Amino acid sequence: MTKILGFLLLVSGVALAQAPTAQAPTLKPVGTVDDLMIGIIWPISDEVFYITTRETPKTEEEWLHFQGRMLMLAESANLLMMPGRAWDNDKWMKDSQRLYDAGSAAYKAAKARDLDKIASLSDAMYAACVGCHNDYRPNYRKRPLTPEPVPEQ
Ligand code: HEC
């Protein structure tokens, strides 16, 4: 039974592959993973981590700006997963998914102007960073934890 199913899937897969569907556009990464971290993911996640202590949006204009930043953060998870940039098709995807989930929730909460909700997402967001760094950053444990603030001297 499994064999038959597998065969059917194979056949329909071939048929689909040959159908004259529009070709997916070729994605062309501009920056490296490191560039995304430094330019987008690190600074924007900081806006979540410090939402109540540093950069609380107040005016409607600030909220709109913040909302856009959360959208960028959530979408950056897709950028990490895109072919040509993802480091593998395994744990990398799961680690990126956690950033996607936390980022999407933050975007939703930003649209609802729900400050408490955003603050409560801090832990999940942080776990997403640390999870992937543990898996993929060489010498990660030798470096100070990002984005934990460096202790005052
Ligand atoms: C899917 C994996 C993944 C996720 C999720 C992830 N990172 Fe990274 N991050 C990496 C990798 C891999 C590197 C090292 C890149 C390299 O050396 O080329 C890195 C490097 C960094 C760096 C170091 C940049 C430098 O050059 O010193 C910072 C800062 C950083 N990440 C912040 C974050 C923060 C903050 C989050 C969560 C909001 C996060 N990262 C989530 C994979 C991830």
Image (cartoon, grey):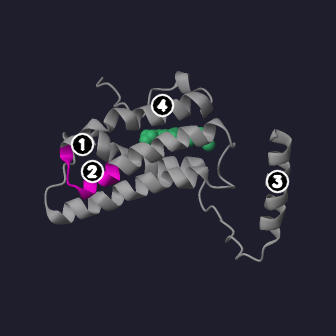
Q: Amino acid at mark 3?
A: Leu
Helix, strand or loop at mark 4: helix
Q: CA distance from mark 3 to mark 1?
A: 47 Å
Residue 139's place in the image compared with 43, above or below, is above
Which stretch appears magenta? 106-115
* Prevailing secondary structure class for the magenta stretch in the rendered image: helix
x and y, in percent, of residue 137 in the image: 59, 33
Q: CA distance from mark 1 to mark 2?
A: 6 Å
Nearest to N terminus: mark 1 or mark 2? 2
Q: Amino acid at mark 4?
A: Val
Left or right, 142 with reference to 73: right
Nearest to N terminus: mark 4 or mark 3? 3
Is residue 123 among the parts visible in the rendering? yes
Dot 4 corresponds to which residue?
Answer: 130
Dot 2 corresponds to which residue?
Answer: 109
Question: Which residue is pictured at 51% across the width and 30% down the height?
Answer: 131
x and y, in percent, of residue 109 in the image: 27, 50
Say if mark 1 contacts mark 4, CB within 8 Å. no
Nearest to N terminus: mark 1 or mark 4? 1
